[in-house]
Image (spheres, helix red, strand yellow):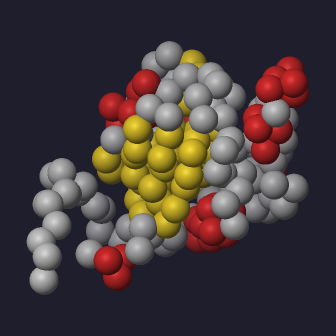
Amino acid sequence: APTTPAPAAAPRRSPGAGPIIVFETMKGSFEIETYPNEAPKTVEHVLALVKRNFYNGLRIHRYEPNFVVQWGDPQTRDMTKRDDWGTGGSGTPVGALEVSKKRTHGIGAVALAHRDGDPKGGDSQIYITLAERHELDAKYAVFGQVISGMDVVQKLRIPDRIIRVTVRDEAKK
């Protein structure tokens, strides 16, 4: 059989982690592991959006140094709607706030955003923390963690584009 080059150092996965989601962006790729044990509805919701290509072509709509980078609003495909970026979603919120003491907002935590005062309203907007932000722990559901490509995440800015998002096929390993 033909040999394929070994991938870069295999990402370290946590015990109990679920499917890995791969984000291909203009600046490079990064991977996150998901936490279906702690946030089952959130993980299921995001995976369903990924599988229907919801995130493909969306742009980063929020970047705050040493805080977060955020995306997931379908309006970001349209530069003329830039004033409204960050207000849209898939239209089907998760309907639960799945916070856990086990999964917290360290560097590279992946969580679901929601409007202030609507903790069950998390939908398609995802953010990644660029620094430890434990003040968010009880307010937002951490459903994943960056396991490779954090250097890419650190470079993302408004209006960088997410080209393609896929769930890594475990069978290919």
Q: Residue at x 81, y 55 (%)?
A: 90
Is residue 14 visible in the rendered image? The answer is: yes
Q: Position of residue 47 (x, y in %)?
A: 60, 66
Residue 123 against residue 173 in the figure, above or below: above
**Left or right for 172, reference 41:** left
130 sits left or right of 147 in the view: right
Q: Quadrant of the C terminus?
A: bottom left
x%, y% of residue 38?
A: 51, 66
82 relative to 24 in the view: left or right: right
Which residue corresponds to the image point at 30% horizontal and 62% vertical from the top-left? 14
Expressed as whole percent of the image width and height from the top left, the position of residue 49 reads: 68, 63
Residue drawn at the location 66% of the way across and 44% of the way down: 57
- Locate residue 167, reporting x and y percent: 49, 66
Q: Is residue 140 visible?
A: no
User: Relative to 142, does residue 105 appear above or below in the rendering?
Assistant: above
- Is residue 101 placed above or below 36 in the rendered structure? above
143 and 166: which one is in front?
166
**Label tally:** 0
Q: To which quarter of the image does residue 22 belong?
A: bottom left
Which residue is the extreme one toward the front? 2
- Which residue is pictured at 12% across the width and 71% down the height? 3
Q: Quadrant of residue 72?
A: top right
Which residue of the protein is positioned furthest toward the top in this rendering? 65
Q: Quadrant of the N terminus?
A: bottom left
